Amino acid sequence: MSLSRCWRRALRMTAVRLRVRVRCDSSVSSAAGPVDTIYALSSGQGRCGVAVVRVSGPAAGGALRSVAGLSRALPAPRTALLRSILNPQTNEVLDRGLVLWFPGPHSFTGEDIAEFHIHGGPAVINGVLQALGSLPGLRPAEAGEFTQRAFHAGKLDLTEVEGLGDLIHAETEAQRRQALRQMAGDLGQLYNDWSQRLKRCLAHVEAFIDFSEGDLIEDGVLNQVDLDVPQLQMEIENHLCDERRGERLRSGVQVVIAGSTNVGKSSLFNILCQRPAAIVSPIAGTTRDIVETSLDIGGFPVLLSDTAGLRDTGDCVEKEGVRRARHMVELADVTLVLVDSTQLPQEPPMVSGFLREYLMNVLPSGNNYKQQRLLILNKIDLLPKEHISAIQNVLTQTSDLAPVCILSCHSREGLERFLTLLQDRLKTLCGDPLAGSPSLTQTRHRAHLQNCVEALNQYYQYRNVDLALAAEGLRLGLSSLGRITGKVGAEEILDVIFRDFCIGK
């Protein structure tokens, strides 16, 4: 090979490195890790049997020796050792507890970590924290700083960090399962797989642009890219079409109780809350504002709202309550539409028409709410049994009213069936967090994935016009995926180029 051709090839490689480094996000995380040592109470606040104080950083070993009174060697890694916990300034014994040593990089943060398992009284905890604060080079940790260091050390990606936060805040069984799956890396693995495939496509296009001269690139490279990009885009779009199941499960399903005045909305609200959370009275229009509470129904998180009775009124305060009630119904995932059974027509065949008109007055017009509503006929304890049976027969033959529950908030008759139907609806809306592909759980994930799809459209737009602009679309898509997990870098693209093509040997 001639000297001039070698120089041209070297210049092209330099250009690739510079262009990729400029156009790609280097990474969300910084390569330089922190050098100071932090400490904090890692268990919950308040009195408890055992509290855990964690220290992380280069001075963690020295802090363990000083506070645990260890003159020489540190404890064996990941082995509990019973020691007296001392104030290093006065040698006063603060407590007697277990100490553990986790040398880096085999620790949660990737740094040296020491843990003190002490008794959970406030005086003991404060004494140990003050003792650690008296040591040089140690400072109290900021909120989330231990997890932040784990992210910078590559122990967790951003989706796993979010899963850890969700697990800590999980209040229902379904939330726990979803958070645990995300913290285990299932969601991050899905996004990383897409990133690797898109990275390969981008590397092939980059290589074709810069090294297609001189027969350095195999034939059909771009043809494979043309097959891979639409497949990847289809998978991302299918992931986005999840009806917000994961986000609902994470933040809670909006369930709104709505209906006319004095139909029993507040009574049902109190039954579900299992406490007198809302005022109940025979006076129409008692509830004038939104009353909300968080519940666990069948393992699913629910944000339940009681609303003002829907009617025309001249009272300005009640009118505002009605406006807010209608607004909540528009935002609801599930609307529980209550009806006073004593107000139904005496002739059972007329019941279906009455309920249709009632639903039109309660639910927003122009929307199909069949899959997001339950129709509840309350106060059946005030009707004769034969009349109730006749109504049930009519409703059984009516298919356009969505599920109908007949119950009495006074006697609790029919309540069990209502709860079963409500749980089924919640399960449909949230799905099974352990089944199928991991769910999209964060609004920011959705935004970045939508940006990725839009960027991939740029590839199609410029594929036969300007290959450099088409590659820019792939690069923007890769950047959007990388922002979800916090992992995207220029050198990774170069690695693919060198691995797949023997450029320069």
Image (cartoon, rainbow, N blue to C red):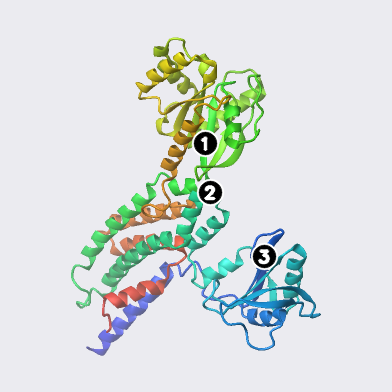
Q: Which residue is mark 1?
A: 255
Residue found 71% across the figure and 58% down from its top: 46
**Could you tell me residue 212's position as x and y percent?**
23, 73
Residue type at mark 2?
A: Thr
Q: Which of the two labelled residues, at mark 3 and mark 2, occupies the earlier sequence position?
A: 3
Residues at discs 3 and 2 in contact (Cβ within 8 Å): no
Check if mark 2's residue and mark 1's residue have beta carbons within 8 Å: no
**Kind of residue indicated by mark 1:** Val
Instruction: Tell me the mark number nearer the camera, choosing from 3 and 1.
Output: 3
Q: Residue 131 at x, y = what percent?
A: 75, 74
| Tag 3 residue | 50
Q: Secondary structure at mark 1?
A: strand
- Vertical placement of residue 312 versus 53, above or below: above
**Along the viewing direction, whichever of 505 and 434 lies nearer the viewer:** 434
Asked whether the beta carbons under mark 3 and mark 1 sit within 8 Å of each other, the answer is no
Of labels 2 and 1, earlier in sequence is 2
Q: Which mark is residue 172?
A: 2
Tell me, yes or no, if residue 54 can be seen here: yes
* Residue in front for this viewpoint, 463 or 267: 267
Q: Earlier in the sequence, mark 3 or mark 1?
A: 3
Considering the numbered disc 3 on the image, is that residue within a helix, a strand or a loop? strand
